[in-house]
């Protein structure tokens, strides 16, 4: 799951803050116990230094190292026994004097080997959710997608099938899921269902990038003329590497050779890497064919599942209904 650079950075910062907070809490707990039972501090200090001191003395004096180590072992056993008595007498556990990692799997590093640990994944999921909440209205739910705004008959049945298909898509999303193209006039629910999918897929722990076509092209343009390579990559890689990319309002951007090239790159790269993309547009299939390069159109209609939204502008219907009430 390839989260955007900003999401991963914020998640790592939170993990480090949690690690430092846990370390500080450990220090306070251990210091409080040592303050109350100073003999425990003395014993632990002695246990840490006994072997090293005796071994050094044996080596420096030319004595018997084995004998010195045996002596250290006896002293340590005596100290450990006294330590155990103090702990038991005061209802303390060994763990009370140990520093506990914030994650038992990765120790707080965020990775088990080269694999991202579940603790860091969860923080990434939370940070990604914040990004989506900032972009979306916050009220989009599948239950809130009302079919009664669509004309009875064939159109309503088609829209019910589209809603069901989107619910199944979000529920069963996995890497390699198919891409979808939402077409239809404004106010027919394309953005609403896209947002519902984005939220549910993100909640399942997958990386999701949701943006307007204009913002995506703006990021690609900024990356092209950026000063630093790392900044340039960060602006565009999120569109190429995320598990699910949702591009809203394709066709609202100024059509140039640059935007056509950027769109082709996004669609083609994600198709080759089998990463899912959802594109919504107010343009009809014929208008898409007129506006975009044949290579783009071929991929859109050859690899994307077409979902045609029909009906009347729901925003206008709601406004009219509100005025009447």
Image (cartoon, rainbow, N blue to C red):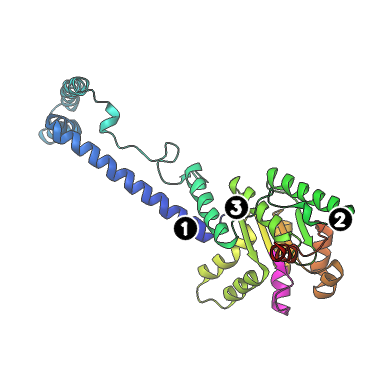
- In the rendered view, does 124 fall on the left or right side of 89? right
- Secondary structure of residue under mark 2: helix
Pointer 2: what residue? 155
Q: Earlier in the sequence, mark 3 or mark 1?
A: 1
Q: In this rendering, is residue 285 above or below 169?
A: below
Find disc 1 in the rendering and name its residue.
9
Circle 1 — which element?
helix
Is residue 239 among the parts visible in the rendering? yes
What whole-number distance in Å separates the C-alpha atoms at marks 2 and 3? 33 Å
Numbered circles on residues, count: 3
Range drawn in magenta:
248-263
Would you say 202 lies left or right of 279 here?
A: left
**Does the CB distance between marks 2 and 3 fall below 8 Å?**
no
Q: Position of residue 213 (x, y in %)?
A: 67, 69
Q: Nearer the viewer, residue 60 or 279?
A: 279
Tell me the residue at 89%/52% (across/down). Answer: 153
Side (left or right) of 242 relative to 17 = right
Q: Position of residue 24 (x, y in %)?
A: 28, 45
CB of mark 3 within 8 Å of CB of mark 1? no
Q: Residue furthest right?
A: 154
Contact (Cβ within 8 Å) of mark 2 with mark 1: no
**Foreground disc of the pair 2, 3:** 2
Judge depth for marks 2 and 1 and give the one in front: 2
Q: Earlier in the sequence, mark 2 or mark 3?
A: 2
Is 256 contained in the magenta span? yes
Tell me the element at label 3: loop
Residue 86 belongs to magenta span: no
Give the CA separation, mark 3 to mark 1: 14 Å
């Amino acid at each position: 799951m390839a989260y955007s650079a900003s999401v991963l950075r914020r998640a790592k910062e939170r993990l480090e803050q949690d690690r430092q907070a846990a370390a500080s809490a450990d220090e306070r707990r251990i210091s409080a116990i040592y303050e109350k039972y100073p003999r425990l501090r003395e014993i632990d200090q002695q246990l840490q230094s006994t072997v090293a001191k005796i071994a050094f003395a044996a080596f420096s004096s030319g004595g018997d190292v084995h004998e010195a180590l045996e002596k250290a072992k006896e002293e340590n056993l005596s100290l450990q026994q006294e330590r155990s008595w103090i702990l038991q007498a005061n209802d303390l556990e060994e763990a009370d004097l140990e520093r506990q990692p914030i994650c038992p799997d990765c120790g707080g590093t965020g990775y088990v080997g080269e694999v991202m640990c579940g603790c860091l994944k969860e923080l990434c999921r939370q940070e990604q959710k914040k990004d989506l909440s900032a972009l979306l209205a916050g009220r989009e739910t599948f239950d809130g997608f009302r079919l009664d705004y669509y004309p009875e008959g064939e159109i309503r049945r088609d829209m019910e099938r589209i809603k069901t298909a989107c619910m199944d898509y979000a529920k069963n999303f996995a890497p390699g899921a198919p891409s979808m193209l939402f077409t239809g006039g404004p106010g027919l629910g394309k953005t609403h269902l896209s947002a519902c999918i984005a939220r549910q897929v993100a909640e399942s722990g997958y990386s999701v990038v949701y943006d307007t076509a204009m913002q995506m092209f703006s990021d690609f343009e900024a990356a092209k003329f950026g000063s630093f390579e790392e900044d340039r990559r960060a602006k565009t890689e999120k569109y190429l590497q995320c598990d699910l990319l949702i591009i809203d309002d394709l066709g609202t951007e100024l059509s140039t050779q640059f935007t056509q090239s950027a769109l082709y790159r996004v669609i083609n790269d994600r198709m080759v890497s089998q990463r899912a993309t959802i594109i919504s547009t107010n343009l009809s299939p014929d208008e898409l064919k007129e506006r975009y390069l044949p290579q783009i159109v071929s991929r859109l209609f050859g690899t994307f599942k077409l979902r045609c939204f029909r009906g009347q502008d729901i925003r206008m219907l709601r406004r009219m209904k509100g005025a009447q009430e």
